[in-house]
Amino acid sequence: HGSFRGRWQNRNRHNNRRRDDLNKPQLKGKQAKYLMQHTRRGKQWKRRGVTRRYNNRNVKQKEASVKVAADWKVVEQFDLSALTKMSMTPPQAEDLKWCGQLYKYNDEYDRVSTKNESKLKRFENVSFLNVTTVDDPVIQEYAKETTQKGEGSTVFCTDELMAHLMTCSRSVYPWDIYFTRLENDIVFIDKREDSRLEMLTVNETATMRTTQEDESKVAAINQAEKLSIEATAINQNFSQQVLNKTRKKTYPNPNPLWDEEDEEEGMEPASFAYRYRKWKLGNLTLIARTELHCRVDRAVKGQKAQLATIYALNEWDSKLSGGVDWRTKIDTLPGAVLATELKNNACKLGKWTAQTLVAGANLMKIGYVSRVQSKDPYNHVILGTQFYKPREFAVQINLSQSNMWGTLKALIDIILKQPVGKYVLMKDPNKPTLRVYSVPMSTFMAEEDDEDDDEDEDEDDAAIENDLD
């Protein structure tokens, strides 16, 4: 009986509602049409809202780049969008020191096309050095001089970290960079030993959002981490392949990052030049190590060769990436290929452009490298190359130099307002939010100390063995 009573009560409610509707004044003409349109639109938005909430629950959640410890304290938090409003006049750079060597660019690669493709080689005997700021011996010298002279606020960095901070408003993936503020207003901007900042991202800014279901269906070779390793290897190999090793310029100072004693036999450093530069950012001084990758002959004889950086974009599977097929478009419509890359890899291209600008290079060479077969991540071919002038390219990709320097200055000022200590700037893994954490000075040093202790123990064991012999 209870269930019957419920059905009867519901029917009464329905009849009462119909009676009320009949008693309401009926709308006619435009009023009735307007009401119907808005009622229908409201239902559509309601359905869309349900779908969006459902999709958001299924979007794959990213993990933080580093685990936040219990003793980390948030001292600042803000949205990435706030950085797009920062601005300052780009400062003039002063060269401090040139090190290493530069080979000429091999212009044969300007004639590469889909009909004349070139196989990408592997340079397994080349060591690509990713030395952190505090471990750079030249920066250590300048830091010591600055401390002795007491020249005021001085910041030490590398072009890689500068470019990342300058363009971080474009970033989607999680990352972290730490700042060490010492006495006399000296600041080191650095990365962890096991940081992945030097690894290239792939499709970071693509509009497609990967769900947990999609991730499970994607082949292992096309998952984000594997694509990052593949892109980084392509970029490194391409930077060495397009050089003319018969012509080089050697600078007065040797490569400061290369230690032959610590390297394996038969290995050699990547053919880069290191240009140490200084900038005045208002009331503070910035000193950084920048990289140059090659020299390019001028079209007019008698003029000095131009300095350039070298990078490579890579195609893995145009059907899965939401891009265009390079083999059918790159020769006839290169602009369409670049436009798609700007949409899918805005952060990576912005960082490359910023690195080229802070290094004072005249040109930026970008190679277009594709898999031989879409299911083979180990073999690649070069389908084309293109030179870009960094200032013009920055305008093309909507990268403002004023905003680059304004963003960097704003982030440094946040650290300089804090007391002496160590701070971690961290991008939220799933939101466009930055947080600054105050962390113990020993943070990120435990692993390094363990490695040093292991080395010391090995040396002690060897000494004891010698004594026993």
Image (tube, rainbow, N blue to C red):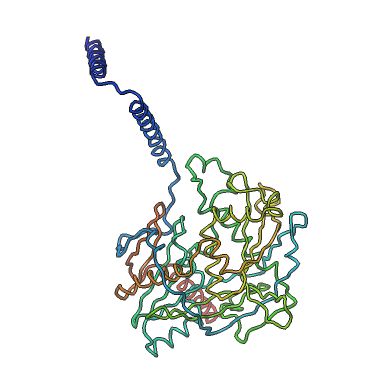
Of residues 42 and 160, the one nearer the viewer is 42
Q: Left or right of 78: which side holds 62?
A: right
**Residue ranking furthest to the right:** 116
Residue in the picture at 43% in, 47% down: 61
**Residue ranking furthest to the bottom:** 149
Q: Position of residue 13 (x, y in %)?
A: 23, 16
Question: Above or below — where is 12 with respect to 364?
Answer: above
Q: Left or right of 19: which side holds 441?
A: right
Q: Quadrant of the C terminus?
A: bottom right
Of residues 92 and 52, the one nearer the viewer is 92
Q: Quadrant of the N terminus?
A: top left
Q: Position of residue 412 (x, y in %)?
A: 38, 72
Residue in the picture at 62% in, 80% down: 100
Of residues 79 and 430, the one nearer the viewer is 79
Question: Above or below — where is 331 with respect to 219?
Answer: below
Q: Position of residue 331 (x, y in %)?
A: 71, 55
Would you identify the image quadrant in which residue 257 lies? bottom right
